[in-house]
Amino acid sequence: MEGSFIGSRLAIAITASVHALFATFIVGGMLLGATAESVGVLTRDERYERLSHSIARTLVLMSATVAFLGVVLVLFLTILWPNFWTLLFRIMFWPLIFEASMFLGEAACLYPWYYSWGKWPRKTHLLIAWLGATFGVVAMVMIDTVGSFLLTPRPVAPALHRMLNPSMVQLTLHRFAGNLSWFGFGIAALSAIRYLRTKDPRERAYHEWAGAFAITLGFGFLLLMPIIGFSYLKAIRFASEGAFGRLMLGEKSWIFVLQVFLIDVLILVGTWYMFRIANFHYRDNVYFKRYRLITFLLLAVAAVVFVMPYQMRYIPFAEYFTSAEVNPWGKMQPNKYIAMGVMIGLGILNYGFYLGALRFKTEWGGGGRLPQVLLIVLGLFTIFSMINMGYARENARYPYLIYGKMTIEEEREIGLGGGSREGPTSRQENPEERNRQAPRGLEETRKR
Amino acid sequence: MRQSIRDWFDERVGLDIFERMLQKPLPKRGAWFYTLGSATLTLITLQFITGAFLMFYYVPDGEFAESSIRYITEQVRYGWYLRSMHRWSANLLFIVIGLHIFRVFVSGSFKRPREMTWIIGAFIFWTVIGIGLTGGLLPWDSNAHWIGTVFGNTLSYFPLVGRFLRSALLGGEHVGTLTLTRFYALHVWVLPLVLGILITLHLYLIRKHGLFGSVIEYRDQIRALEAQGVRRESIIVTKMTPDETEPFYPAQVFRDSIIAFSLITLVSLFSTLFPFSPYRGEEPPPTRIIPRPEWFFWSVDEWLMYFPGKLIPIGLVLITLFFLFLPFIPFVERHPEVSPIRRPVSTIIGAWVYLFIIILAMMAGARIFNY
Amino acid sequence: MNQTAEEPIGRRHFMERAILSIFGAIGVMLTPPILGYILSPVFRIREDLSQSTRWAPVAPVSEMETVGDLPRTFDVPYRVKEGWRVRETSRQVYAVRKGGELALFSTFCTHLGCPTAWDDAKRMVICPCHGGLYNNFGEVIGGPPPRNLASLEYKVENGVVYLKDPANVYEVGWKDPRKRA
Ligand code: HEM
Ligand code: FES
């Protein structure tokens, strides 16, 4: 019985995260595809047309998978965690129904968008694309109300408060920017793979260009992510103090250290890629080399400061290197803020330089293998960080399923875990105690 | 009869100037976007009118301000309506100004020779923000009190001059009797006067230069000049061919009137459906007061939140620099290209800034709604 | 410009200078008085404060005795002189027992001065504006505040606890300018 309960958690977790990974890809993809097509119409540049067409093909291939995974997820939830699912469905009936119908709407736009390519009048075609993107975004907002409710629930009535719970807006924005960023990096990695597999110079030119274009979106939205994430964590701290403590200060804090490491890598590798691509434009500028060197040094220092863990004892395998429980250098406040500011500030600056150089880039396809490898690295790390974030989010609520309202234990009692209902005692021991740390004081970190 | 009256005035006032103004050619393309400026003007006029009448009953004194507002909203006939109009139209004004700036930026209309129009526009923007800020204090309820406090304390973080600024603005170390009269004077007289002068200049300059056409037409013109060997920096594109334009009167005035009508209807509708009441129920005990800034300051509020402890002045200086930077935009982007698609860097940066501001405001809104 | 023979360059030059000086003089006559007029309250802060309540009663000692190591909020009424008016108002302070001693500290968040409140469920002092968090002794544990809640001076007289200088709101910002570092 014990085994099957853990198995149920695992099954749900895996389906949910893969479903989320694909679903976010589709939302980002609809938006980016529609944007690319519109830009193509405005600039009359055929590459955008081709890009949006191939995006559409990718999405068509994917959306069936997403629908399948969604159905499997719902099945799993109904079978394995009936108690939780009934409760959640009751609370969130309308958002969930709305979400499903919006997804339907999105799919209903996606297929005609792909299959009517070149057949329908331009305006109708664009309209369909943007309509589908809008549906996708609305579906995402709806599922975010549900997701954020799990972590930061508010009194169920009135409905407005239930929907606009403390972390709802932040989660939505985080996902919105995140989807676009993720999709940008994902498409860039795909074009990099195609680039590496072809020898045809015309194809290479196109794929290199597509990667560079996708990075303008991926990196641009990546820069927003830490800022939104900051506000998001603040909202969690306000509403679900225990979850925040578990995630940022407690035993799961290593997940976040890992996440910061991934962000570091994304920013550093992204910058490297941008410099490689922009190099042709600034090559003759005497200051450019110096600037590049200084940027990388600053970024590296900032990255190291940013990733510096405080709670060493919770990091897996750390005991092989050090016996310290906490970082002897302290919490590095406010240096971490400064580090984050430096990374975002330099990121914006370099992004500007990159855009400025792209304007003048006319020869594509001769960039060599390195930038493409960087793109693939970026894509992989993005996937990694998406999964990591999902894991962090779901683990933060442990041992609750709905924070402060329903624990995993309660599901086990009624659901798969077998009929050992011991009455209200198990409910009375306040699960929040497990997350609460020793008496509050200056001890408590001021980490973001 | 009409003709003779016209002649009488023409002789004494010189109507021909105005007639020439009305005949000024305007670009046909994108004409609806050009109504944003006059929409702003409509709302500002509405502000002037409703504000002037609110002054008939309002008393700018710490003891009576709140009661006088209550009197206006509860006893004076249509007082609630005027007050709600004033507030709703202020809210709308910020949206419309934001859109107007965006359209001017995206269409590159701030470029030579229209730099001064933009610069004065930026001054207008500062003034409007100042009016919004000072107006927030006049209801003088506890929320207003805390808004003033937070504002003053924000100023006090400016390096070197901070404390002085706070005392100079608040008329003391904290929000009190003297603060209200100051903010009142600024809100109803000093800043509106400045605004009036600036708007006059703005409109004069627009009439002088004519509106920028919807840009795409100029591309060929620029190309042709470049082909003749003219340096890009020295190309001025102002001329439009007659078939690209139409006179201001009546086509554009018609559009403007439609927009003005819709806006005022909207404001009036909002004021009737969601009037501002002076009290949010009973006055809550002081500990439970949650200061709520006006939504147009949300993004600033959120921005400052990202700079904790010793870093506060950095955030403050950065945001001040952002506002100070606005008038310099025409000098940063100097090339004559105006099409948003052909200057993608500016378009992307502009869109990014707007997106950023909106995201900040949304997050602050969520925070304020839930705290 | 139309310079005629009768108008020698010297005259014109003189008039230009004169115009400048006239307007300069007008400016000099107007500006300093206006500046002084506007800034007058800034220079009078100290004077106003000296005419405000110096010691405001908080609560009888017997009541303070019941305060434990979780902060309790007290209303402190006082008079403050502002310009031409003396105003009756009140503020709040936290009282807490710290190491056996009574300690009073401010309710004003050190970040931007919002009114904080003690949250019993979360066992923290919470600032509603930007989520500043303090522990029961007013020490920062999270959020943007730059320093701990200001601790306030008090005295005990005739069985009543008095708060010093309640009108002197120097409790926001990095440091208290009254205390020389
Ligand atoms: C009270 C606020 C304002 C009013 C009443 C106002 C009014 C107007 C009007 C009526 C026009 C012509 C119609 C149109 O283009 O929409 C205009 C154009 C313009 N405005 Fe404003 N405006 C205001 C604020 C601003 C601000 C804040 C800026 C910039 C920072 C700005 C920059 C410009 C520029 C550069 C033009 C010329 C556009 C062109 O020639 O195509 N204005 N304004
Ligand atoms: S005023 Fe308290 S956190 Fe900002």
Image (cartoon, coloured by chain):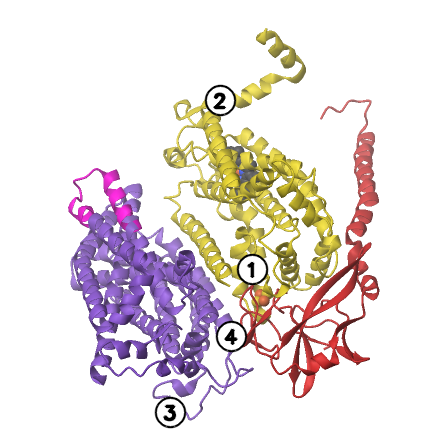
Measure the C-alpha gap from mark 4 to mark 3: 36 Å
Q: Tell me which residue sits at (65%, 56%) in the image.
A: B145
Earlier along the polypeptide chain: callout 2 or callout 1? 2
Q: Tell me which residue sits at (75%, 25%) in the image.
A: C3
Q: Residues within 10 Å of mark 2 (few under 14, many from 20)?
A: some
* Residue C121 numbered mark, or none: 4
Residue bearing mark 2: B249
Residue bearing mark 1: B318
- Amino acid bearing label 4: Ala
The kind of secondary structure element at disc 1 is helix
Using the image, name the chain to which the residue with label 1 belongs.
B
Using the image, name the chain to which the residue with label 3 belongs.
A
Place of residue A35 in the rendered image (x, y in percent of width and height, measured from the top left):
30, 49
The reply to whether residue A283 is visible in this rendering is no
Residue bearing mark 3: A319
Say whether mark 2 and mark 3 are on the same chain: no
Q: What shade has chain A been given?
A: purple
Measure the C-alpha gap from mark 3 to mark 2: 80 Å
